Amino acid sequence: MQAAGELGVEGEGVWLALGTVLMLLGMVYFIAQGWGVQDPRQKEFYIITILIPGIAAASYLSMFFGFGLTEVPLTNGRVVDVYWARYADWLFTTPLLLLDIGLLAGASNRDIGALVGLDAFMIVTGLAATLMKVPIARYAFWTISTIAMLFLLYFLFVVFSEAASDLDEDSKSTFNVLRNLILVTWALYPIVWLVGTEGVAAVGLFTETLLFMVLDVTAKVGFGFILLRSRAIVGEESAPTPSSEEAAAD
Ligand code: RET
């Protein structure tokens, strides 16, 4: 992918097709699971969690068809093939993921808003890093974006965990699993960017597309699967479990 060839999806198309199918399957599974749910709080989780792979499926399909692919000619002569459609996907889906986990934790609107703002900043500066022509500017924006991510993950770990400490045992354990899933998967994105074609190009577009696809499917479908199957969501309408002292108060 070093040379400025004709602009088109090549071998990596297989991962974009697989990504589209997995996101669609995730979305259909979540819709089937949420069919007929009446409880307004449960409905809210289902709607958010269905939207996440839905948006991603649209983004993956557009990338598969070569829409959202552009070439960035760098000042050092290298031409980088960039799938900018991912950033459009992430700009909408990462706040929705934070909203999901924020609502589960019972975090305040102010705290959720702060995290979403930081998240949007991270994605937009990441897009800037991706589109810059001067290599040093690319790494400068990558650093800014990564610092924003570290603040975001720290805030999630401290503030949301604090809010979640008041929850019942089921919700608390689901929160912990999802929080750890976010910590691990999200932290890998800047690394994939750096080793991939946008960064030092240690791996080609084929491998990079595979890695982002695996991360996206895990962070979206894996996340939704754990959230919507948990007793924290499913169990709450049926018998309130007297598993914690607070539950006895109901
Ligand atoms: C970029 C590049 C610049 C540095 C950083 C990045 C972080 C991206 C992240 C994306 C998360 C996406 C998810 C998608 C869907 O589930 C933009 C790659 C820090 C954290 C979770």
Image (cartoon, rainbow, N blue to C red):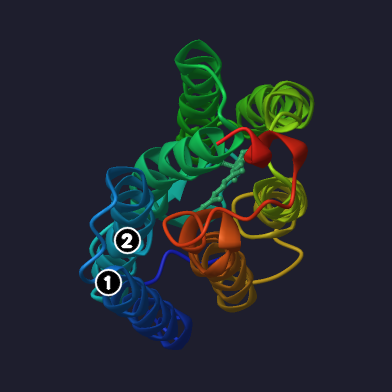
User: Residue 125's spot in the image, x, y percent?
Assistant: 52, 26
Left or right of 199? Residue 115 is left
Which labelled disc corresponds to residue 31?
Answer: 1
Who's the residue at 60% across and 68% down the image? 218
| Up-down relation of residue 109 to residue 161 (above or below) | above
User: Residue 173's spot in the image, x, y percent?
Assistant: 75, 52
Who's the residue at 35% across and 41% down the image? 92
| Element marked by disc 1 | helix
Q: Nearer the viewer, residue 6 or 162?
A: 162
Mark 1 or mark 2, which has the lower sequence index?
1
Q: Nearer the viewer, residue 46 or 194?
A: 46
Q: Are marks 1 and 2 in contact (CB under 8 Å)?
A: yes
Give how far apart the Cα atoms at labels 1 and 2 are. Answer: 7 Å
Residue that label 2 marks: 50
- The amino acid type found where label 2 is placed reads Ile
User: Residue 156's spot in the image, x, y percent?
Assistant: 69, 30
Who's the residue at 48% across and 19% down the image? 117
